[in-house]
Amino acid sequence: MEFGESLRMSLRAIRGHRVRSSLSAFGVVIGVAAVITLVTLGTSLRAEILSQFAGDRAPNMFVWVGPPGGGPGFGAQAAFTQHDIAGLRRLDGVAAVVPQGVVPVVALAHGGETVSQNDVVATTPAQFRNREFAAGGPFEQGKREVVLNPLAARLFEDGVTVGDRVSIRTASGETVSARVVGVLDGSGGTGRFDDGALPRAYVPTRPFYDSTVESPTQGTEQRVYPLLTVVAESHGEVPETKEKVRSYLRSDSDAARLAPDDYGVHVRTDRDLVRRVEELLTTLTTFVTSIAVVSLVVAALGIANVMLVSVTERTREIGIMKAVGAQKRDVLQLFLTQAILLGVIGSVFGVAVGAVGGYLATDYVGLPLVFAAEVVPVAIAVGLVVGMVTGLYPAWSAARVDPIDALRYE
Protein backbone atom coordinates (compact mmCIF):
# COMPACT_ATOMS: atom_id res chain seq x y z
CA MET A 1 0.00 0.00 0.00
CA GLU A 2 1.30 3.42 -0.95
CA PHE A 3 1.90 5.97 1.83
CA GLY A 4 -0.54 8.42 0.20
CA GLU A 5 -3.32 5.86 0.43
CA SER A 6 -2.48 5.12 4.08
CA LEU A 7 -2.55 8.86 4.82
CA ARG A 8 -5.93 9.30 3.12
CA MET A 9 -7.48 6.38 4.99
CA SER A 10 -6.01 7.57 8.31
CA LEU A 11 -7.47 11.05 7.82
CA ARG A 12 -10.84 9.51 6.99
CA ALA A 13 -10.70 7.42 10.19
CA ILE A 14 -9.82 10.51 12.26
CA ARG A 15 -12.66 12.54 10.71
CA GLY A 16 -15.04 9.65 11.30
CA HIS A 17 -14.44 9.89 15.06
CA ARG A 18 -13.84 13.62 15.47
CA VAL A 19 -14.61 13.91 19.19
CA ARG A 20 -12.55 10.92 20.25
CA SER A 21 -9.61 11.85 18.02
CA SER A 22 -9.76 15.47 19.16
CA LEU A 23 -9.68 14.49 22.82
CA SER A 24 -6.65 12.23 22.34
CA ALA A 25 -4.82 14.91 20.33
CA PHE A 26 -5.85 17.50 22.93
CA GLY A 27 -3.69 15.70 25.47
CA VAL A 28 -0.67 16.26 23.24
CA VAL A 29 -1.72 19.91 22.76
CA ILE A 30 -1.73 20.46 26.53
CA GLY A 31 1.60 18.71 27.04
CA VAL A 32 3.45 20.51 24.25
CA ALA A 33 1.83 23.86 25.12
CA ALA A 34 2.89 23.49 28.76
CA VAL A 35 6.47 22.73 27.74
CA ILE A 36 6.62 25.62 25.25
CA THR A 37 5.10 28.05 27.78
CA LEU A 38 7.48 27.08 30.58
CA VAL A 39 10.55 27.06 28.33
CA THR A 40 9.59 30.51 26.97
CA LEU A 41 9.04 31.82 30.50
CA GLY A 42 12.36 30.35 31.65
CA THR A 43 14.25 31.71 28.63
CA SER A 44 12.74 35.18 29.11
CA LEU A 45 13.56 35.15 32.83
CA ARG A 46 17.09 34.01 32.10
CA ALA A 47 17.66 36.72 29.50
CA GLU A 48 16.26 39.43 31.78
CA ILE A 49 18.30 38.40 34.84
CA LEU A 50 21.52 37.99 32.87
CA SER A 51 21.05 41.36 31.17
CA GLN A 52 20.65 43.04 34.55
CA PHE A 53 23.33 40.95 36.22
CA ALA A 54 25.93 41.34 33.51
CA GLY A 55 25.10 44.55 31.68
CA ASP A 56 27.93 46.90 30.76
CA ARG A 57 30.08 45.91 33.70
CA ALA A 58 33.60 46.70 34.77
CA PRO A 59 36.28 43.97 34.72
CA ASN A 60 35.73 43.25 38.41
CA MET A 61 37.02 40.48 40.66
CA PHE A 62 35.40 39.89 44.05
CA VAL A 63 37.73 38.69 46.79
CA TRP A 64 36.90 37.34 50.24
CA VAL A 65 38.11 34.85 52.84
CA GLY A 66 35.45 32.30 53.71
CA PRO A 67 34.47 28.64 53.92
CA PRO A 68 34.27 26.50 50.77
CA GLY A 69 31.12 26.89 48.66
CA GLY A 70 28.56 29.66 48.76
CA GLY A 71 28.29 32.83 46.74
CA PRO A 72 30.46 35.95 46.81
CA GLY A 73 30.99 37.16 50.37
CA PHE A 74 29.59 33.98 51.98
CA GLY A 75 31.00 33.70 55.51
CA ALA A 76 33.50 36.51 54.78
CA GLN A 77 36.06 37.12 57.53
CA ALA A 78 37.91 40.41 58.03
CA ALA A 79 41.39 39.41 56.83
CA PHE A 80 42.58 41.95 54.24
CA THR A 81 44.87 44.62 55.71
CA GLN A 82 46.16 47.85 54.23
CA HIS A 83 49.35 45.92 53.46
CA ASP A 84 47.36 43.46 51.30
CA ILE A 85 45.54 46.27 49.50
CA ALA A 86 48.83 48.02 48.71
CA GLY A 87 50.34 44.75 47.49
CA LEU A 88 47.40 44.06 45.18
CA ARG A 89 47.56 47.57 43.72
CA ARG A 90 51.19 46.94 42.70
CA LEU A 91 50.30 43.85 40.64
CA ASP A 92 50.46 44.19 36.85
CA GLY A 93 46.99 44.43 35.32
CA VAL A 94 45.28 45.80 38.45
CA ALA A 95 43.64 49.19 37.92
CA ALA A 96 42.08 49.61 41.36
CA VAL A 97 41.42 47.82 44.64
CA VAL A 98 38.25 48.79 46.49
CA PRO A 99 37.96 47.65 50.12
CA GLN A 100 34.57 47.18 51.74
CA GLY A 101 33.82 46.94 55.43
CA VAL A 102 30.58 46.64 57.32
CA VAL A 103 29.63 49.17 60.00
CA PRO A 104 26.92 47.74 62.28
CA VAL A 105 24.09 50.23 62.82
CA VAL A 106 20.61 50.05 64.30
CA ALA A 107 18.78 52.81 62.42
CA LEU A 108 18.87 55.73 60.01
CA ALA A 109 17.00 58.94 60.82
CA HIS A 110 15.93 61.88 58.66
CA GLY A 111 13.40 64.68 59.14
CA GLY A 112 12.08 63.30 62.41
CA GLU A 113 11.54 59.83 60.90
CA THR A 114 13.56 56.77 61.92
CA VAL A 115 13.89 53.53 59.97
CA SER A 116 15.62 50.30 60.97
CA GLN A 117 18.89 49.41 59.21
CA ASN A 118 21.34 46.63 60.04
CA ASP A 119 24.51 48.11 58.58
CA VAL A 120 26.14 50.58 56.23
CA VAL A 121 29.00 49.82 53.82
CA ALA A 122 32.32 51.56 54.48
CA THR A 123 34.37 51.89 51.30
CA THR A 124 36.40 54.32 49.19
CA PRO A 125 35.34 56.69 46.38
CA ALA A 126 36.69 54.13 43.87
CA GLN A 127 33.57 52.09 44.66
CA PHE A 128 31.66 54.43 42.33
CA ARG A 129 34.12 54.61 39.43
CA ASN A 130 31.72 52.71 37.12
CA ARG A 131 28.45 53.91 38.61
CA GLU A 132 25.96 56.45 37.38
CA PHE A 133 24.37 58.88 39.83
CA ALA A 134 20.77 60.04 39.71
CA ALA A 135 21.94 63.07 41.68
CA GLY A 136 25.20 64.26 43.22
CA GLY A 137 28.38 62.20 43.20
CA PRO A 138 30.85 60.21 45.33
CA PHE A 139 31.82 61.14 48.87
CA GLU A 140 35.29 62.28 49.94
CA GLN A 141 37.52 60.35 52.32
CA GLY A 142 37.73 61.86 55.80
CA LYS A 143 34.37 63.60 55.60
CA ARG A 144 31.05 62.72 57.22
CA GLU A 145 29.25 62.08 53.95
CA VAL A 146 26.99 59.30 52.68
CA VAL A 147 25.90 57.93 49.30
CA LEU A 148 22.54 56.12 49.06
CA ASN A 149 21.20 53.66 46.53
CA PRO A 150 17.65 54.33 45.21
CA LEU A 151 15.95 52.03 47.73
CA ALA A 152 17.69 53.70 50.67
CA ALA A 153 16.76 57.15 49.35
CA ARG A 154 13.10 56.09 49.36
CA LEU A 155 13.13 54.65 52.88
CA PHE A 156 11.75 57.89 54.28
CA GLU A 157 8.27 59.13 53.48
CA ASP A 158 9.45 62.47 52.08
CA GLY A 159 12.47 60.93 50.36
CA VAL A 160 16.08 61.98 50.66
CA THR A 161 17.89 64.28 48.24
CA VAL A 162 21.44 65.55 47.85
CA GLY A 163 22.24 68.07 50.58
CA ASP A 164 19.98 66.49 53.21
CA ARG A 165 21.44 65.20 56.45
CA VAL A 166 20.94 61.63 57.68
CA SER A 167 21.61 60.53 61.26
CA ILE A 168 23.35 57.15 61.51
CA ARG A 169 22.84 55.40 64.84
CA THR A 170 25.62 52.88 65.32
CA ALA A 171 25.39 49.63 67.27
CA SER A 172 27.67 51.16 69.93
CA GLY A 173 25.04 53.81 70.69
CA GLU A 174 26.75 56.70 68.90
CA THR A 175 24.76 58.95 66.55
CA VAL A 176 26.65 60.39 63.58
CA SER A 177 25.19 63.05 61.29
CA ALA A 178 26.25 62.70 57.66
CA ARG A 179 25.42 64.80 54.61
CA VAL A 180 23.93 63.03 51.56
CA VAL A 181 26.24 63.81 48.62
CA GLY A 182 24.96 61.30 46.06
CA VAL A 183 22.05 59.06 45.10
CA LEU A 184 22.84 56.18 42.73
CA ASP A 185 20.61 55.53 39.73
CA GLY A 186 20.34 51.77 40.39
CA SER A 187 22.20 50.50 37.31
CA GLY A 188 25.70 49.12 36.82
CA GLY A 189 25.90 47.35 40.17
CA THR A 190 28.73 45.22 41.33
CA GLY A 191 26.91 42.00 42.09
CA ARG A 192 26.65 40.57 45.59
CA PHE A 193 28.89 43.20 47.18
CA ASP A 194 26.64 45.99 45.95
CA ASP A 195 23.42 44.21 46.95
CA GLY A 196 21.25 46.57 44.89
CA ALA A 197 18.12 44.62 45.82
CA LEU A 198 18.35 46.05 49.38
CA PRO A 199 18.45 49.58 50.79
CA ARG A 200 22.16 50.37 51.02
CA ALA A 201 24.09 53.34 52.41
CA TYR A 202 27.80 53.87 51.64
CA VAL A 203 30.15 55.87 53.85
CA PRO A 204 33.92 56.58 53.66
CA THR A 205 36.22 54.28 55.60
CA ARG A 206 37.59 57.39 57.33
CA PRO A 207 36.13 58.28 59.80
CA PHE A 208 33.38 55.61 59.94
CA TYR A 209 35.28 52.31 59.82
CA ASP A 210 37.63 51.47 62.69
CA SER A 211 38.10 47.67 62.60
CA THR A 212 41.84 47.03 62.96
CA VAL A 213 44.24 44.14 63.47
CA GLU A 214 47.98 43.75 63.85
CA SER A 215 49.49 42.98 60.45
CA PRO A 216 51.35 39.63 60.67
CA THR A 217 53.89 40.78 58.07
CA GLN A 218 54.38 44.41 59.17
CA GLY A 219 53.78 44.19 62.92
CA THR A 220 51.70 47.39 62.88
CA GLU A 221 48.02 48.05 63.63
CA GLN A 222 46.11 48.37 60.34
CA ARG A 223 42.52 48.56 59.17
CA VAL A 224 41.19 45.13 58.15
CA TYR A 225 38.40 44.45 55.65
CA PRO A 226 36.23 41.40 54.87
CA LEU A 227 35.67 42.16 51.18
CA LEU A 228 37.67 43.53 48.27
CA THR A 229 36.76 44.42 44.71
CA VAL A 230 39.79 44.23 42.42
CA VAL A 231 39.31 45.99 39.07
CA ALA A 232 41.46 44.80 36.17
CA GLU A 233 42.74 47.24 33.54
CA SER A 234 40.64 45.55 30.84
CA HIS A 235 38.28 42.63 30.33
CA GLY A 236 40.93 40.78 28.35
CA GLU A 237 43.33 40.87 31.30
CA VAL A 238 40.84 39.49 33.83
CA PRO A 239 41.87 35.78 33.63
CA GLU A 240 45.60 36.49 34.00
CA THR A 241 45.07 39.14 36.67
CA LYS A 242 42.77 36.79 38.58
CA GLU A 243 45.57 34.22 38.84
CA LYS A 244 48.04 36.88 40.01
CA VAL A 245 45.62 38.07 42.69
CA ARG A 246 44.96 34.52 43.88
CA SER A 247 48.69 33.68 43.94
CA TYR A 248 49.59 36.82 45.93
CA LEU A 249 46.81 36.40 48.49
CA ARG A 250 47.60 32.74 49.10
CA SER A 251 51.33 33.26 49.67
CA ASP A 252 52.60 36.76 50.54
CA SER A 253 49.53 38.35 52.12
CA ASP A 254 48.31 38.99 55.65
CA ALA A 255 45.04 37.35 54.63
CA ALA A 256 46.77 33.98 54.20
CA ARG A 257 47.98 34.20 57.81
CA LEU A 258 44.81 35.66 59.34
CA ALA A 259 42.40 33.22 57.67
CA PRO A 260 41.07 30.37 59.84
CA ASP A 261 42.49 26.94 59.02
CA ASP A 262 39.37 25.67 57.24
CA TYR A 263 38.80 28.92 55.30
CA GLY A 264 40.30 29.86 51.96
CA VAL A 265 40.84 32.92 49.78
CA HIS A 266 38.20 33.13 47.06
CA VAL A 267 38.47 35.18 43.88
CA ARG A 268 35.35 35.38 41.74
CA THR A 269 34.94 37.39 38.52
CA ASP A 270 31.81 38.87 36.97
CA ARG A 271 32.02 36.17 34.33
CA ASP A 272 32.06 33.48 37.04
CA LEU A 273 28.99 35.01 38.68
CA VAL A 274 27.10 35.23 35.39
CA ARG A 275 27.99 31.62 34.59
CA ARG A 276 26.77 30.49 38.03
CA VAL A 277 23.47 32.34 37.66
CA GLU A 278 23.07 30.89 34.17
CA GLU A 279 23.59 27.35 35.46
CA LEU A 280 21.03 27.84 38.23
CA LEU A 281 18.43 29.24 35.83
CA THR A 282 19.03 26.41 33.36
CA THR A 283 18.59 23.83 36.12
CA LEU A 284 15.40 25.50 37.32
CA THR A 285 13.95 25.69 33.80
CA THR A 286 14.82 22.05 33.13
CA PHE A 287 13.21 20.92 36.39
CA VAL A 288 9.98 22.82 35.79
CA THR A 289 9.81 21.69 32.16
CA SER A 290 10.30 18.05 33.17
CA ILE A 291 7.16 18.32 35.27
CA ALA A 292 5.21 19.46 32.21
CA VAL A 293 6.50 16.41 30.30
CA VAL A 294 4.31 14.27 32.57
CA SER A 295 1.27 15.58 30.68
CA LEU A 296 2.83 14.25 27.47
CA VAL A 297 3.01 10.79 29.02
CA VAL A 298 -0.71 11.02 29.86
CA ALA A 299 -1.39 12.15 26.28
CA ALA A 300 0.55 9.17 24.94
CA LEU A 301 -1.62 6.80 26.97
CA GLY A 302 -4.69 8.52 25.53
CA ILE A 303 -3.53 7.98 21.96
CA ALA A 304 -2.70 4.34 22.70
CA ASN A 305 -6.19 3.83 24.12
CA VAL A 306 -7.85 5.43 21.10
CA MET A 307 -5.84 3.30 18.72
CA LEU A 308 -6.67 0.07 20.58
CA VAL A 309 -10.36 0.96 20.46
CA SER A 310 -9.98 1.78 16.75
CA VAL A 311 -8.43 -1.65 16.09
CA THR A 312 -11.36 -3.34 17.84
CA GLU A 313 -13.98 -1.30 15.94
CA ARG A 314 -12.30 -1.89 12.58
CA THR A 315 -11.70 -5.62 12.98
CA ARG A 316 -14.11 -6.47 10.16
CA GLU A 317 -12.52 -3.82 7.93
CA ILE A 318 -9.10 -5.34 8.63
CA GLY A 319 -10.44 -8.76 7.63
CA ILE A 320 -11.79 -7.41 4.33
CA MET A 321 -8.48 -5.65 3.60
CA LYS A 322 -6.55 -8.88 4.17
CA ALA A 323 -9.08 -10.90 2.16
CA VAL A 324 -8.47 -8.71 -0.91
CA GLY A 325 -4.70 -8.98 -0.63
CA ALA A 326 -3.49 -6.51 1.99
CA GLN A 327 -0.30 -7.62 3.73
CA LYS A 328 0.54 -7.33 7.43
CA ARG A 329 2.88 -4.44 6.71
CA ASP A 330 0.02 -2.57 4.98
CA VAL A 331 -2.22 -2.86 8.04
CA LEU A 332 0.71 -1.93 10.31
CA GLN A 333 1.44 1.13 8.16
CA LEU A 334 -2.20 2.23 8.18
CA PHE A 335 -2.67 2.26 11.95
CA LEU A 336 0.81 3.58 12.66
CA THR A 337 0.16 6.49 10.27
CA GLN A 338 -3.06 7.31 12.09
CA ALA A 339 -1.33 7.37 15.48
CA ILE A 340 1.52 9.53 14.17
CA LEU A 341 -0.99 11.95 12.62
CA LEU A 342 -2.72 12.40 15.97
CA GLY A 343 0.63 13.11 17.65
CA VAL A 344 1.84 15.57 14.99
CA ILE A 345 -1.50 17.42 14.82
CA GLY A 346 -1.52 17.72 18.60
CA SER A 347 2.07 19.01 18.70
CA VAL A 348 1.47 21.59 15.95
CA PHE A 349 -1.55 23.04 17.77
CA GLY A 350 0.41 22.73 21.03
CA VAL A 351 3.19 24.94 19.66
CA ALA A 352 0.65 27.61 18.72
CA VAL A 353 -1.08 27.44 22.10
CA GLY A 354 2.30 27.39 23.89
CA ALA A 355 3.46 30.50 22.03
CA VAL A 356 0.33 32.35 23.13
CA GLY A 357 0.74 30.98 26.66
CA GLY A 358 4.38 32.09 26.76
CA TYR A 359 3.40 35.60 25.67
CA LEU A 360 0.66 35.84 28.30
CA ALA A 361 2.92 34.41 31.05
CA THR A 362 5.80 36.82 30.35
CA ASP A 363 3.40 39.74 30.04
CA TYR A 364 1.79 38.82 33.37
CA VAL A 365 5.10 38.80 35.27
CA GLY A 366 6.44 41.82 33.38
CA LEU A 367 9.27 40.16 31.43
CA PRO A 368 10.32 40.90 27.83
CA LEU A 369 9.30 38.00 25.59
CA VAL A 370 12.19 35.82 24.40
CA PHE A 371 10.72 32.94 22.41
CA ALA A 372 12.83 29.76 22.28
CA ALA A 373 12.40 29.01 18.57
CA GLU A 374 14.69 25.99 18.78
CA VAL A 375 12.04 24.21 20.85
CA VAL A 376 9.51 24.17 17.96
CA PRO A 377 11.13 21.41 15.84
CA VAL A 378 11.78 19.47 19.05
CA ALA A 379 8.08 19.73 19.95
CA ILE A 380 7.04 18.50 16.49
CA ALA A 381 9.50 15.63 16.77
CA VAL A 382 8.12 14.77 20.21
CA GLY A 383 4.61 14.59 18.78
CA LEU A 384 5.85 12.29 16.01
CA VAL A 385 7.66 10.04 18.47
CA VAL A 386 4.68 9.95 20.84
CA GLY A 387 2.41 8.89 17.99
CA MET A 388 4.88 6.29 16.74
CA VAL A 389 5.57 4.73 20.13
CA THR A 390 1.97 4.69 21.32
CA GLY A 391 0.65 3.47 17.98
CA LEU A 392 3.17 0.68 17.56
CA TYR A 393 1.44 -1.92 19.74
CA PRO A 394 -2.11 -1.24 18.42
CA ALA A 395 -0.80 -1.35 14.84
CA TRP A 396 1.04 -4.60 15.54
CA SER A 397 -2.16 -6.05 17.07
CA ALA A 398 -4.12 -5.04 13.97
CA ALA A 399 -1.54 -6.63 11.67
CA ARG A 400 -1.83 -9.94 13.55
CA VAL A 401 -5.63 -10.19 13.16
CA ASP A 402 -6.66 -13.40 11.40
CA PRO A 403 -8.73 -12.47 8.31
CA ILE A 404 -11.21 -15.37 8.74
CA ASP A 405 -11.88 -14.46 12.40
CA ALA A 406 -12.09 -10.78 11.42
CA LEU A 407 -14.77 -11.47 8.76
CA ARG A 408 -16.85 -13.32 11.39
CA TYR A 409 -16.49 -10.43 13.87
CA GLU A 410 -19.72 -8.62 14.69
Image: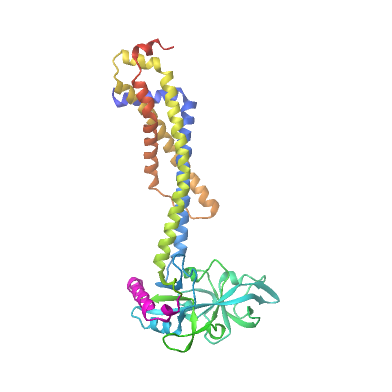
Q: How is the image coloured?
A: rainbow
Q: Is residue 352 visible?
A: no
Q: Is residue 277 visible?
A: yes
Spot occupied by residue 112 in the image (x, y as percentages of width and height): 71, 76
Q: In the rendered view, tell whether residue 178 sits above or below residue 280.
A: below
Total tally of numbered discs in the picture: 0
Q: Residue furthest right?
A: 112
Q: Nearer the viewer, residue 281 or 22?
A: 281
Residue 203: in magenta span: no
Please give the name of the residue rendered at 40% of the width and 31% of the height, measured from the top-left corner.
390
Please give the name of the residue rendered at 55% of the width and 84% of the height, measured from the top-left corner.
210
Q: Quadrant of the C terminus?
A: top left
Residue 239: in magenta span: yes
Q: Quadrant of residue 280?
A: bottom left
Q: In the rendered view, tell whether residue 368 sits above or below residue 160.
A: above
Q: Nearer the viewer, residue 75 or 165?
A: 75
Q: Residue furthest front?
A: 261
In the image, the segment drawn in magenta is: 234-259
Q: Going by the image, does 255 lie left or right of 331? A: right
**Dominant secondary structure of the residues highlighted in magenta in the image:** helix
Q: In the rendered view, tell whether residue 188 sits above or below residue 207.
A: above
Please give the name of the residue rendered at 36% of the width and 25% of the height, measured from the top-left corner.
395
Spot occupied by residue 381 in the image (x, y as percentages of width and height): 36, 39
Q: Nearer the viewer, residue 67 or 136?
A: 67
Q: Going by the image, does 286 lie left or right of 152? A: left
Spot occupied by residue 250 in the image (x, y as percentages of width and height): 38, 76
Q: Quadrant of residue 258?
A: bottom left
Q: Quadrant of residue 399?
A: top left
Spot occupied by residue 231 in the image (x, y as percentages of width and height): 40, 76
